[in-house]
Amino acid sequence: MNKNNTQTNNFSLSNDKVSATILLVPALIFCTIFIFIPAIGTIVGSFYSYSLTSMNNWKWVGFGNYVKATQDEYFWVALKNNFIIVFASIVLQVGVGTILAAILDRGIKYGRVIFRTIIFTPMVISSVAVSLIWLIIYDPNVGILNAIFKSIGLSTPSKGWLGDPNISIWMIMITAAWQNTGFMMVLILAGLQGVSKEVYDAAEIDGATGVKAFWYITLPMIRNVLIVAILITTIGAFKVFEFIFVFTQGGPSNATQVLGTYIYLQAFNLLHMGYANALSVILLIIALFLGWLQLKSSRKA
Amino acid sequence: MNFLKFITKKIYLFIFSLFLSFGFITSSYAVDITIWDLSGRNGQDEFYDNLNKEYKKINPDVNIILQTFENEAYKTQIQVALNGNDGPDVFFNWFGEDSARLARAGLALDITPYANVEGGYGNYISEGLSNTTAVNGKIYGVPNTSVSKYFHYDPAFFEANSLAVPKTFDDLLNLCRDIRAIDSSIVPWPLGNSERWKLNHVITMLNQRVVGEENTAADYNLSASEDELFTNPAYVEAWQKVVDLQDAGCFQDAPNATHPDLTRSMFASQISPMIYCGTWCGGIFNGEGFSDFSYFRFPEVVGGAGAATVGFLVPSGMMVSAKTAHPEIAAHVASFMVSDDMALQAAELMGFMPSNPTKIGEMSNPTHWFNFYVNDIADKTGHVNVLDVLLEANVSNAYLDMGTEILNRTKTPQEAMDFIRQVALEAKAAM
């Protein structure tokens, strides 16, 4: 009887394994075609010099493209900008998102759903459409932002909001924050709603209310949600492309160049496909590291 | 069990109908010729509809299929498509370094053998024009139009304020100052350089006027020696002229943040009295409700090495993909587009400056700007191609970037040329 049971269990186990393998096959095929093969192609291509119009003429350069990256001023500008975007996105999207979530959770009594919907709405619009709308807002000749500044007696940047290399990246960040803060708010709000009311009642007895309660009770309690939010924002900031491409195409004078747009420029405009591959591999390594961090922290969360 | 039988029957039926339809398709011998072109041209759909109908009269089994793309996106997409297996048979291109690169890479078809066959492009356009597409003596394209650039101005404004059309570059500077003196809020010459190419067209002309086309040739094709490459001090002088224009108040405050479309609207709505705009602009101004404009050439730079009778001209037209399954038909379709009747239709419907002017006199109602463009292009003693089409990709990009830097005053003309020279030296070394 026992023997039979064991046999049945073994059969069922192996049957499960077969089913699992069969179910995994389609996903594996798609991943192989659309992720693994292109990724391997990119890594291989990064050791060669070739262009989009000379696909049959690959020249081996070893680590030459990676050495070139270390000496390329604009690569460092792009990387620096990615880090600026990471920092700004965390402050603007996660920071403001947390404050908004706290207000919606405990700060207001009425209209929570309406406010939540309004703040979340930009998230469902395509980034390209958002960029085009803000392009008109920022326009130095007919844009509403200039009109508002002038109407209250403030001066506007003479090179334009997007034409001034010192401020253009920040203007793009504001737009990105406008679009994505709502998502962060909803994510963090879900975390906040998981915090037991009893904890606040207990804290109130100990004299911790308002900002104090938020600082000492709320934030530590949603720590794991905040880590996930920060990681999602960080990865998004490294992958950023559409905003920069539509707003400035990396200009003025490469001031808003990020890795995504710089790879595009090198591959399709300057025809350095091998070099673009090397830059993509660097971006891939950064993304993998961040992905690993995200996975680790999500498990903890 | 019955269900299984039912399903099996359905599958057999499906496979049988597939065979039937396959047989039907193959028996008709229809050939699809896909053409890729830029989008947004007035009258384009009507032109291609007519092209399809007219071509069917001589070759009923050929379907011409048009796919259009936005200007900036097209530059990338065509390169990707030509490398793949699903690209167009015939495609639009600007003739210069862009087209030559495709030819050198073997992505464009050598259409020299199709020049003088029946209906070949050699029957319709001049050899000189065909040669603008030549690489190593072989022809790779069929130019169907050319674009040039002129100052368009508002004669009513000029007349009301007793302003004269500038003859020299200094006159142009004074004109800007005079307009600002009339009303400082008027932008004399709106410049939309957010996509970088607008100033590139201006510096193309300034290089020609100041440096001279004979002196630029060796630098532009990177054949000058390393010691001499882009060292002519006149290049710095040409950039300085841009600074002078800005100092004279010609442009609005933030040209690098202004889209070219907006500047066209500023002129068309008579907010600004002049604009340097291409031969495609006349129809746009008219479409926006302003047709009482006039034109003048880019003024002479006194003391410059280039003649004022030389103009800006970018030939463009159709190339044939080297991967087309029907090279002969594709080359024939490209040629048919410049046949006498189709060239006339291109001029009438799309405002093209046709490469085949045989029937130009038969145009029903040519606009005043069309007549001006055609006659003036013919009057010029020579032409220069625009830098972002003509130069090697890296040098072209350096020129585009430096235009932005000069307008932002983040680089001096000398620093801009030092940078361009450095990029040119690297590009020459990589050749």
Image (cartoon, helix red, strand yellow):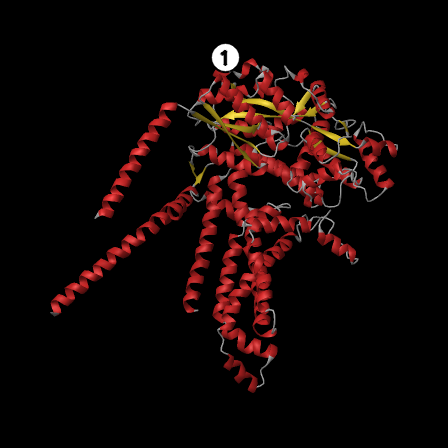
Residue B202: quarter of image: top right
Residue matched to label 1: B118
Residue A117's place in the image compared with B213, above or below, is: below
Furthest residue to the bottom? A205
Q: Residues within 10 Å of mark 1 (few under 14, many from 20)?
A: few
Question: Residue at left 36%, top 26%?
Answer: B26
Let me know if residue B136 appears in the view. no
The kind of residue on which mark 1 rests is: Glu
Tell me where residue A93 appears, x and y as whole percent. Answer: 57, 62
Secondary element at tag 1? loop
Question: Residue at left 42%, top 64%?
Answer: A296
Tell me where residue B329 appears, x and y as whole percent. Answer: 46, 21
Residue B204: quarter of image: top right
Residue B132's place in the image compared with A144, above or below, is: above
Please give the chain letter of the residue carrying mark 1: B
Residue placed most toward the observer, B185 or A274? B185
Residue placed most toward the observer, A137 or B427? A137
Tell me where residue A7 appears, x and y as whole percent. Answer: 15, 63
Furthest residue to the front? B2
Let me know if residue A10 appears in the view. yes
